[in-house]
Image (cartoon, rainbow, N blue to C red):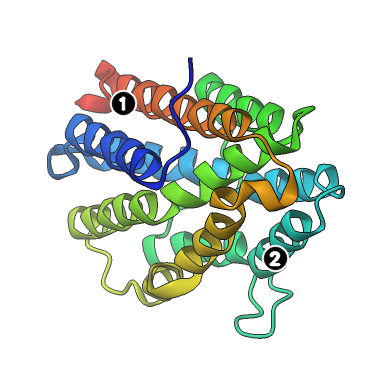
Amino acid sequence: MVNKLEAHTVNQMVEDLFKKISEMLDISSLTEDQLIYILKEHTVFSKQNTIFLEQGMLRAQEIEELSAELKRNLDEEIGLDEDHGEHHYLLYVDGIRKDLQLDTANHTPSQATCAFIGSMLNLSTSYSVSKICGAIYASESVAIPELEIMKDITQRYAEKSGATSLKRLNHFYDMHLSGVEQAHRDGLSEIVFDYKRNGMKPDEIMEGFEGAINSMLVWWESINSSIREEKLAA
């Protein structure tokens, strides 16, 4: 049985998720190889994020307000908005390549990352527009705490590897953490919590939200297990 759709409930779920992730990763203790692994796996997921938005937008056509909001978010992610005009994934991998001297664009993802992407794709192409809305709302809700973790991982790797400038990556993180991601979440929040005006079903919204949150936890637990393997933990 899913939880009731309430703001404090979804906020608490996001907070609990990232408390678990932060505690199990223990970023300050990670080796260079472990940090590289996380960066590479995360960029694979980041590349697919626009696909979730696009598929959700296409399947939400019956609810014009939701479809339009997802299109705004998608346009911003791929650099078609007037304010930023930069493809966010390309900024990310270019920053990692030039600031950290790491090639993440050609990384072959783990089975866990592929499974997570598959799970999110299934949620964003659901038969239920309400479920799609909930899943993408979860993705937007976790964006800020997830990027804060990735920023810490980036800084930790820079310290250990001797990288002297994070100009490009700081631009990427600052752009998202100073308003972009919050605006994405706020736009969807109005639709989610005023679900009646669009005829959406709160139980199905929460089903999508919880499904995405649970998939994220499984993914991060899998990443944590992988980096604890002997070849990376040494």
On the question of residue 208 being in view, the answer is yes
Which secondary structure lies at badge 1?
Answer: helix
Above or below, 15 relative to 95: above
Horizontal placement of 231 versus 147: left or right?
A: left
The residue lying at 35 percent from left, 45 percent from top is 11
Q: Residues within 10 Å of mark 1 (few under 14, many from 20)?
A: some
Which secondary structure lies at badge 2?
Answer: loop
Give the image quarter of residue 178.
bottom left
Looking at this view, is 5 or 12 the one in front? 5
Give the image quarter of residue 204.
top right
On the question of residue 46 being in view, the answer is no
User: Which mark is on residue 224?
Assistant: 1
Instruction: Give percent across and percent down for residue 113.
Output: 53, 28
Looking at this view, is 84 or 195 the one in front? 195
* Residue farthest toward the front in the current orientation of the protein: 196
Give the image quarter of residue 184.
bottom right
Above or below, 180 relative to 135: below
Label 1 – label 2 distance at C-alpha: 30 Å
Q: Residues within 10 Å of mark 2 (few under 14, many from 20)?
A: some
Horizontal placement of 119 versus 176: left or right?
A: right
The residue lying at 59 percent from left, 22 percent from top is 115
* Residue farthest toward the bottom in the current orientation of the protein: 82
The residue lying at 42 percent from left, 22 percent from top is 218
Q: Which residue is mark 2?
A: 78
Instruction: Give percent across and percent down for residue 142.
Output: 42, 47
Looking at this view, is 98 or 56 the one in front? 56
Q: Amino acid at mark 2?
A: Ile
Looking at marks 1 and 2 on the same chain, the residue that comes earlier in the sequence is marked by 2
Q: Nearer the viewer, mark 1 or mark 2?
A: 2
Horizontal placement of 221 versus 175: left or right?
A: left
